[in-house]
Amino acid sequence: MTIFANEELGSVAALIARGAEDAPAIGAPGRPAMTYRGLRELAARTVAGLNACGIGRGDRVAIVLPNGPEMAAAFVAIGAGATTAPLNPAYLSSEFDFYLGDLRARALIVLQGFETPVRAVAERRGVPVLELVPNPDGPAGDFSLVAPAGLAGAPHLGGFAGADDEALVLHTSGTTSRPKIVPLRHANVTASADNIVRTLALAPDDVCLNIMPLFHIHGLIAAVLASLAAGGSVVCSPGFNAFKFFGWYAEARPTWFTAVPTMHQTLLSVAARGKSAISGGRLRFIRSSSASLPPQVMLALEDMFGVPVIEAYGMTEAAHQMASNPLPPAPRVPGSVGIAAGPEIGIMDDAGNLLPSGDLGEIVIRGPNVTAGYENNPDANLKAFAGDWFRTGDQGIIDADGYLRLTGRLKEIINRAGEKVSPVEVDTVLMDHPAVQQVVTFAMPHSQLGEEVAAAVVLREGATADSDALRAFALARLAPFKVPRRFVFLAEIPKGPTGKLQRIGLAEKLGVSG
Amino acid sequence: MNDDELREKLIDAMREAFQQPTIGYVADQNLRDFFGFDSVQFVNLILMLEERLGVSFGEAEIDSIYVVGDIFRLLRAKLPEQTT
C-alpha cells in the first residue's frame, strides 16, 4: 500500500502526501526528524497492519500514549486508515472504563512498557490491546505495532480513509455529567488544518515546537495537522515543561508555537532563563488559543519574544479553529479573538435570529470544519444546532470591522487552563462522600489558570469533613485537573432569582478567587 | 537554618504558590500527581524558593522532584545547616 499525491482530497492520507519526500515532517528534541517519505511509509505500514487485524475505515482505535513524536505519528498514521480516539493518559480506571465503553473502541494502542490502568480496563472489556513499540534507531516518531496473538481478520472497509470517513472522535465536557462524543470526519479535520495554514501563512520551511497535549483538538490540529498540511514540520516535546522549554527552543529553532494562555504566562515567569535562546531564534509569531488571553500577557509575550502574538478561538466541535487575529500588517486586537478564520461566524439571539454587528448574542458557526453533530445525542443536537448553524455556547459581539470579542459563556463548563471540566461530573463524585449533603462545583476566577475548579459544599448534619479530606476523596476518583482546589463550606448554597442553583456567577457571589 | 526552619520556609512557599493556606508538610506528597509537574503552581514554587532562599535549581534537579521531600532534600544540600 502506498500513499500517492492523488489520494482522495480532504483526507489525512492526501494531506501527508503534500510534503517533499526528504523534508522533515515530525521531529523531537535530541532525535533526527522523520521525513515525509518516512511518514507516508509509516502510515501505509500501519494501515496495512491494522487492516490485517480486521480494523479499517470507521473503526475506532483508542490511543493512550505519552506526549511526543510517537503520539503525533500514531495520530496521523492510524488516522490515515481508521478512526483515532486519543485519550488523556492521566485518566483513572473509572474514567477509562467510561471512555472505552462509550467509544465502542475496536482496539487500544498503548506504549510498550507504559504502566497505565487502561490496560486492565481494556482487558476487562475485551478490547484488544496493541503495543506501540518505538524504533530506537529510527527517526523521531517511528514505531511498529504489535498485535495480540490471534487478532486477525478482514476489515469492513480497508485501505486509506476518504473525506467522508470518520477521522477523529473526542469527548467534550458537557453541562451534564456525561461527556458528549464529537465525531469529526476527514473533511472536517483537513478543512480546519487548511484554515490554520491560510491564517498563519504556514509554508514548508515553518517549524512548530509542540508543547500542547496531543489528546486535545488544539495540539492535534493546530500543531500537528496544520504543520503537515503546509509541508512543514512539527517538533514534538514530551509535554509542556517551562524549565525545559528554552532548551528545546534553542535546538528546534521553531518559527512558531501554539499554547494556552496559562502556558504563555508560565513562560513569562521563567523569561530570564530563555534570553539567549530567544535572541538566536527565528520565530515568526506565537499563537494562543483555548482560553482568553489577557491583553497584558499578549503584550508581555510580544515584548519578550519580539514577534506578534496571534490569539485564536477554537473548540472541539469546529475541529479547532473558528476565528483568529490575522498576521501583520493586518491589525491584531488585544482582547479580541480576531476575525472569522475558516467557518462563517454569526451572532444569534435565543429565537435563532442572526443579529447585526455590534449586538450581543450567542456565537454561532457553520462551515466544512464543523462536526455534523454529537453522536447518539438528539437532545444535545437539538439544542446545539439552529438550522445549519452550530451554537457554541459562548456569548460575544462582532464589531464593524469583523473582530469577535468573547463576553461570557452560556454553558457552565469550567475552563481550567484550556482543560474543560464538567462541574456536574465533579458534583457526582463528591456526592458519594458520606459527609456531603449537597455540592455545587463552579468556576473560580484564577489569575494564571483563567479558571480554577472550586466547590461549594453543604455537609450533612453532624458530619465532618475538611478540604483536605474532600480533595483526597476526589483525587482517588477523578483525574487531577478536575479536582477542586478550593472548597467553600456553607450552611446553604445560594440560589439564583428563580430559585435554581446557579454555577455561573457563584464565585463572585461567594467572593472567592484564586 | 535548621531542618525545622527550612521546612517552615518550604511550607510557606507551597501555601503561597499553591494558594492553599492550610497545606502542611507531607514529605511523600506526590507533586506531579496532584499539581502536575508542568503546572504553573509548581513553576511558581520553584521560582519563589530560588528568590527567597537565594538558591538556583538546575534542570536535572527539577526533573528529580517527585514528592515534597525531594525539594526539602535539594534545599538542604544547597543550604547546609550552620553550626555556631
Image (cartoon, coloured by chain):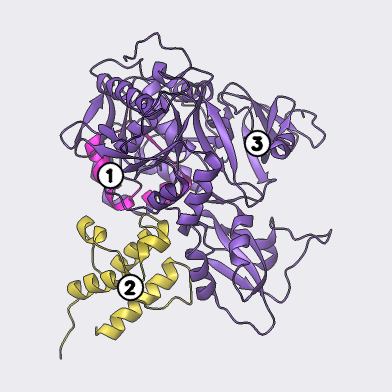
Chain colours: A purple, B yellow
C-alpha distance separating marks 1 and 3: 33 Å
Decide which of B18, A221 is in the foreground and name it: A221
Q: Is residue A253 visible?
A: no
Establish if B12 lies above or below A103. Answer: below
Q: In terms of sequence position, does the residue under pointer 1 or pointer 3 come before the other?
A: 1
In which quadrant of the rendered view does residue A66 lie?
top left
Q: Nearer the viewer, residue A35 or A204?
A: A35
Mark 1 lies on residue: A112
Calculate the distance from the C-alpha at mark 3 to the C-alpha at mark 2. Answer: 45 Å
Judged from the image, the secondary structure of the residue bearing numbered disc 1 is: loop
What secondary structure is the magenta-colored segment mainly?
Answer: helix
The residue labelled by disc 3 is: A376
Q: In the picture provided, is A317 more to the left or to the right than A41? A: right
The answer to whether residue B26 is magenta is no
In the rendered view, tell whether residue A163 sits above or below residue B47. above
Q: Position of residue A494 (x, y in %)?
A: 75, 67
Q: Are marks 3 and 2 in contact (CB under 8 Å)?
A: no
Q: Where does residue A224 sit, x and y in percent of width and height?
A: 39, 31
| Type of amino acid under label 1 | Gln
Give the residue drawn at x 52%, y 65%.
A474
Query: Could you tell me the amino acid type at mark 2?
Result: Asp
Q: Is residue A245 magenta?
A: yes
Locate residue B53, reporting x and y percent.
28, 72
* Marks 1, 2: nearer the viewer: 1
Q: Which region of the structure is painted magenta?
A: A240-267
Q: Is residue A344 visible?
A: yes
Which residue position holds label 2?
A: B28
What is the secondary structure assignment of the residue under circle 2? loop
